[in-house]
Image (spheres, helix red, strand yellow):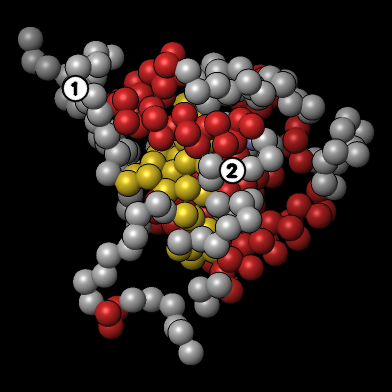
């Protein structure tokens, strides 16, 4: 019997707690990576059943539409309970299985502090799952794989980014992906006091991207933190003007 050919690896996999988290924090970066010819993917850990607005079924259809707009090659959701993302061995294994199947070179995780426990828990859980995915003695049916690089999407974190990604060419499409979540962002009575009105979301999205763009001398950008230091080969090619 000839062995199944290994599926083409994903170059950049974004892992997030909730459907629409990626659209809010690093969707432009996924579009940019796609424009460079890379393969991209999204893993949502929950299905959004605990949200104030919309059912899990609605959010599933919206996530599929957003994935189409973001041009990702794969999008999957796990069944971890929304509002109760916990760093357990069982959950690490669930994520590690996807990491082994998709074999990403780069994983994007949420920043490790924040208001919502699901977000900061996903940061640690995702990191530990990437570690577990590389353990050769762990059998999940797929060969071990550990991503080369982990970066943290820090748009909502009050920290100075390590670097930003220029998304100027992609910001309109990124905004369209966010707006695919009609159950969350279209004006409606449910949760009116909790949710930002639709008209303000565009202003807020563009203002934040503009802020991070200005830090690096481009129009719109998304911020990231890396734990490692940067390595430079040629000082004359380091981007972002100093004076
Ligand atoms: Zn979220």
Instruction: Give how far apart the Cα atoms at labels 2 and 1 are.
Output: 31 Å
Residue 109 position in % (x across, y down): 47, 41
Provide residue 61's location: percent of width, then percent of height.
62, 27
Looking at the rendered image, the disc whose residue lies closer to the viewer, 2 or 1, is 2
Q: With respect to residue 16, does 94 lie above or below?
A: above
Q: Residue 27: in sight, yes or no?
A: no
Residue at disc 2, secondary structure:
loop
Side (left or right) of 91 relative to 145: right
Left or right of 131 in this view: 209: right
Name the residue rendered at 38%, 27% in the picture: 129
Give the residue pinned by disc 2: 113
The image position of residue 75, as x and y in percent, is: 47, 31
In this rendered view, identify the residue nearer to me: 47 or 126. Answer: 126
Q: Quadrant of ligand 1?
A: top right
Identity of the residue furthest to the top in this view? 1
The residue closer to the viewer here, 156 or 209, is 156
Circle 2 crowding by C-alpha within 10 Å: few under 14, some 14–19, many from 20? some
Quick check: is the Cβ at mark 2 less than 8 Å away from ligand 1?
Answer: no
Mark 1 residue element: loop
Q: Is residue 2 left or right of residue 97?
A: left
- Residue, x 23% and y 77% (percent of image)? 234
- Residue contact between numbered discs 2 and 1, judged by CB atoms under 8 Å: no
Dot 1: few (<14), some (14–19), or many (≥20) neighbours within 10 Å?
A: few
Query: Where does the image place residue 77, in percent across and percent down from the top left?
Result: 51, 24
- State the mark number for residue 148: none
Whether residue 196 can be seen here: yes
Residue assigned mark 1: 136
In the displayed structure, would residue 92 be above or below residue 21?
A: above
């Amino acid at each position: 019997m000839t062995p199944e050919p290994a599926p083409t690896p994903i170059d950049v996999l974004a892992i997030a707690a909730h459907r629409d988290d990626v659209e809010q924090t690093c969707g432009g970066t996924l579009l940019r990576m796609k424009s460079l010819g890379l393969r991209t993917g999204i893993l949502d850990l929950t299905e959004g059943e605990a949200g104030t607005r919309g059912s899990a079924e609605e959010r599933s259809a919206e996530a599929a539409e957003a994935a189409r707009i973001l041009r990702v090659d794969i999008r999957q959701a796990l069944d971890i309970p929304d509002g109760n993302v916990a760093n357990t061995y069982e959950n690490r294994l669930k994520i590690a299985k996807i990491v082994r199947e998709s074999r990403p070179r780069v994983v994007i995780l949420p920043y490790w502090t924040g208001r919502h426990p699901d977000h900061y828990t996903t940061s640690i859980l995702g990191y530990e799952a990437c570690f577990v995915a590389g353990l050769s003695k762990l059998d999940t049916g797929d060969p071990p794989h550990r991503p080369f690089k982990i970066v943290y999407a820090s748009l909502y974190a009050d920290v100075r980014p390590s670097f930003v990604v220029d998304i100027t060419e992609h910001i309109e499409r990124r905004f369209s992906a966010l707006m695919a979540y009609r159950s969350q962002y279209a004006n409606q009575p449910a949760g009116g006091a909790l949710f930002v009105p639709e008209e303000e979301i565009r202003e807020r999205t563009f203002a934040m991207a503009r802020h991070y763009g200005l830090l690096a001398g481009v129009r719109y950008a998304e911020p990231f933190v890396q734990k490692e230091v940067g390595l430079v080969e040629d000082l004359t090619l380091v981007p972002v003007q100093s004076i």
